Amino acid sequence: MTIQSRQASDSRSAVPPVERPSAKAHVIKADAEAIAVAEKLAAEFARDASKRDRERIWPKEELDAFSQSGLWSINVPKAYGGPELSYVTLSKVITIISAADPSLGQIPQ
């Protein structure tokens, strides 16, 4: 069996296309805003966190919401267009998200 035929027969090697968000992510401008956004997301994430964990459900909608929230970029330097928020705020955001869903809270670390 050649490498090509093995790859063609192995469905695990196929990577599904990734949908791109239709809107740009929110840009957080202040520490208090980051905390407020994290608290709002945490309330949403907590609802089905144990079900996602128990049933091994990929958190696609939650990851999309996390991405659009602007929280991924809170420690990006201002020179690169980010808010360059404090590491104290970053740790608070991770703590808030982790309290709601530990799996999602590990991602930005």
Image (cartoon, helix red, strand yellow):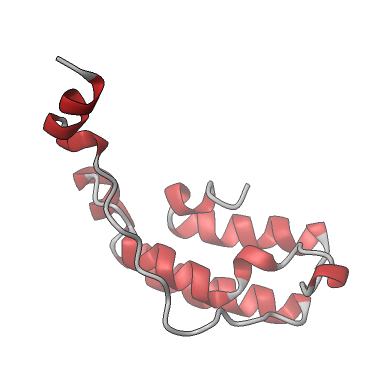
Seen from the viewer's position, the closer of residues 59 and 47 is 59
Q: Look at 16% across and 30% down and name the residue there.
A: 10
Judged left or right of residue 77, residue 94 is left
- Above or below — where is 48 with respect to 105? below
Position above or below: 33 against 10: below
**Closer to the camera in the image, 36 or 1:** 1
Q: Can you say whether 66 is above or below 40 in the image?
A: above
Percent x, y of residue 105:
52, 52
Q: Quadrant of residue 31?
A: bottom right
Left or right of 82? Residue 36 is: left
Determine the image quadrant of residue 82: bottom right
Give the left or right position of residue 1, taking residue 98 as reference.
left
The residue sitting at 80% across, 59% down in the picture is: 88
Residue sticking out furthest to the top: 1
| Residue for point 71% across, 67% down | 74
Q: Report the number of discs.
A: 0
Quadrant the N terminus occupies: top left
**Residue 56 horizontal/vertical position (percent):** 24, 44
Q: Is residue 28 above or below residue 107?
A: below
Residue nearer the viewer, 14 or 41: 14
Q: Residue drawn at (43%, 47%), measured in percent from left and top?
A: 103
Q: Position of residue 3 (x, y in %)?
A: 25, 21
Residue 92 x, y percent position in the rendering:
68, 60
